[in-house]
Image (cartoon, grey):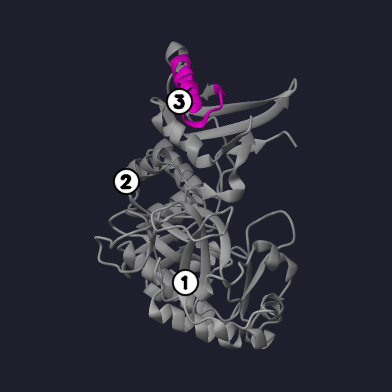
């Protein structure tokens, strides 16, 4: 991807003072003369930042401003290890709200809409971001947060919510509950902004069809503001990233070398205006690709493909690397399966056993045929022979947040 002149100028401005403002970067770049960064090629020689760096900087070592200028902190949603804490200045909060408002506009949301926000609030960035963007847009924000599904449905009806913001897991759960309650004709939703976890084509179609909404993938991560740094457009061909705030690279996960546009790799992001915790060449671990060419929607901001998975989501069975996206592709290709699945990996009698549980409406012999078909497709596409186990619709766990689908019980 070609760096835009305005981005290079912004990066040079950031680098010119970052050692003085940030002990973290003074240490990281101690042997590098940042005034030598004059071109994109120079920039690409700078070392990457990693989540491990941010953990080492706990609690506020990443800050590049005096603590008196920090107006808020957020933390990533991970449950293990030292937390990653990201400080925000007033400008950071305002910039994030502006990016999020752009996302709403890109999805056709206006000030006349009523936006039901179901992601969590607090240290997690999601709920706060969705709300700030709605307020910047001038729309009615309904800050429900996750859970209390019965109340969610009541407010959805009584307040005539037109936009749903949710994880894909909770959007599916709401769709199922709406249909169970027989209130589809009392629901006014027309748009869904879905983020924070990857989702399969079958899951997407189920949510869209059962809720009767147009869905938009929204992208972000706590370290880089939060959700709202990018979103899909009407063309539904990738997600636009706001290039005046964030610079994108895609690299080979193993070598760290830049890959050509259109080739899959790991997304690396650099903030261009962030004050509280600027990040230089931050490895997200998200697997995607930069989509070449202009988008038919007319937006000139760079597009990345739908997130294919994460480098740390991979599991290895019988020497084969397996990503969730590959399993979802198998589910998608298997006739008669629904969107939901769960994978259990166990070690028994000296060998690994991979079991795929999936939902289907089929019973009896038809269910057995679907199990056989999934087994063959899985073996052909991935190279591992699983144990396929069909269950009824709704038998697998549902989540109000993110759904864990792969359980590796070998360790």
Q: What residue do we see at 52% from left, 67% from top?
A: 269
Q: Which residue is mark 1?
A: 246
Q: Which residue is mark 2?
A: 212
Q: Position of residue 84 (x, y in %)?
A: 68, 65
- Work out whether mark 3 precedes mark 2 in sequence or the reverse, and give the earlier one: 2
Instruction: Please tell me whether the stretch drawn in magenta is mainly helix, strand or loop.
Output: helix
Q: Secondary structure at mark 3?
A: helix
Q: What residue do we see at 53% from left, 70% from top?
A: 44
Q: Which mark is residue 151?
A: none
Q: How many marks?
A: 3
Between marks 3 and 1, how big is the CA–CA gap?
Answer: 39 Å
Q: Position of residue 57 (x, y in %)?
A: 73, 71
291 inside magenta stretch: no
Q: Position of residue 171 (x, y in %)?
A: 45, 47
Q: What residue do we see at 60% from left, 63% from top?
A: 124
Circle 2 residues within 10 Å: few <14, some 14–19, many ≥20: some
From the image, which quarter does the C terminus lie in? top right
Question: In terms of image quadrants, where is residue 244?
Answer: bottom left
Between marks 3 and 2, how big is the CA–CA gap?
Answer: 31 Å
Q: Is residue 221 visible?
A: yes
Q: Secondary structure at mark 1?
A: strand
Q: Which mark is residue 377?
A: 3
Circle 1 residues within 10 Å: few <14, some 14–19, many ≥20: some
Q: Is residue 90 left or right of residue 84?
A: left
Q: Is residue 130 visible?
A: no
Q: Position of residue 96 (x, y in %)?
A: 48, 74
Magenta stretch? 368-388
């Amino acid at each position: 991807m070609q760096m835009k002149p305005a981005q290079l100028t912004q990066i040079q401005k950031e680098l010119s003072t970052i050692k003085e403002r940030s002990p973290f970067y003074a240490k990281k770049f101690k042997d590098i003369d940042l005034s030598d960064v004059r071109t994109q090629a120079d920039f690409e020689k700078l070392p990457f930042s990693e989540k491990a760096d941010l953990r080492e900087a706990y609690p506020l070592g990443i800050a590049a401003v005096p603590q008196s200028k920090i107006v808020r902190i957020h933390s990533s949603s991970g449950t293990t290890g030292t937390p990653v804490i990201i400080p925000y200045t007033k400008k950071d909060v305002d910039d994030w709200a502006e990016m999020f408002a752009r996302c709403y506009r890109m999805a056709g949301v206006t000030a006349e809409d009523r936006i039901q926000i179901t992601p969590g609030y607090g240290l997690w960035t999601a709920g706060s971001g969705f709300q700030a963007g709605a307020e910047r847009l001038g729309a009615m924000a309904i800050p429900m947060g996750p859970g209390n599904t019965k109340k969610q449905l009541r407010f959805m009806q009584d307040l005539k919510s037109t936009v749903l913001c949710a994880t894909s897991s909770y959007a599916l759960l709401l769709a199922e509950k709406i249909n169970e309650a027989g209130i589809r004709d009392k629901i006014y939703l027309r748009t869904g902004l879905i983020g924070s976890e990857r989702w399969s084509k079958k899951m997407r179609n189920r949510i869209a069809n059962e809720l009767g909404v147009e869905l938009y993938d929204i992208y972000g991560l706590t370290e880089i503001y939060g959700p709202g740094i990018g979103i899909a457009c009407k063309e539904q061909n990738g997600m636009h990233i706001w290039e005046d705030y964030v610079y994108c690279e895609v690299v080979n996960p193993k070598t760290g070398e830049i890959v050509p546009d259109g080739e899959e790799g790991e997304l690396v992001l650099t903030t261009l205006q962030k004050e509280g915790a600027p990040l230089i060449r931050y490895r997200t671990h998200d697997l995607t690709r930069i989509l070449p060419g202009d988008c038919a929607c007319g937006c000139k901001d760079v597009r990345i493909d739908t997130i294919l998975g994460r480098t740390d989501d991979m599991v290895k069975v019988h020497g084969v690397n397996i990503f969730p996206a590959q399993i979802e592709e198998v589910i998608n290709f298997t006739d008669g399966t629904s969107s939901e699945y769960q994978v259990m990996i166990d070690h028994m009698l000296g060998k690994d056993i991979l079991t795929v549980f999936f939902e289907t409406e089929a019973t009896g012999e038809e269910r057995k045929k679907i199990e056989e078909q999934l087994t063959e497709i899985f073996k052909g596409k991935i190279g591992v022979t699983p144990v396929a186990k069909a269950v009824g619709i709704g038998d697998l766990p549902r989540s109000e947040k993110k759904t864990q689908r792969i359980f590796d019980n070998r360790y």
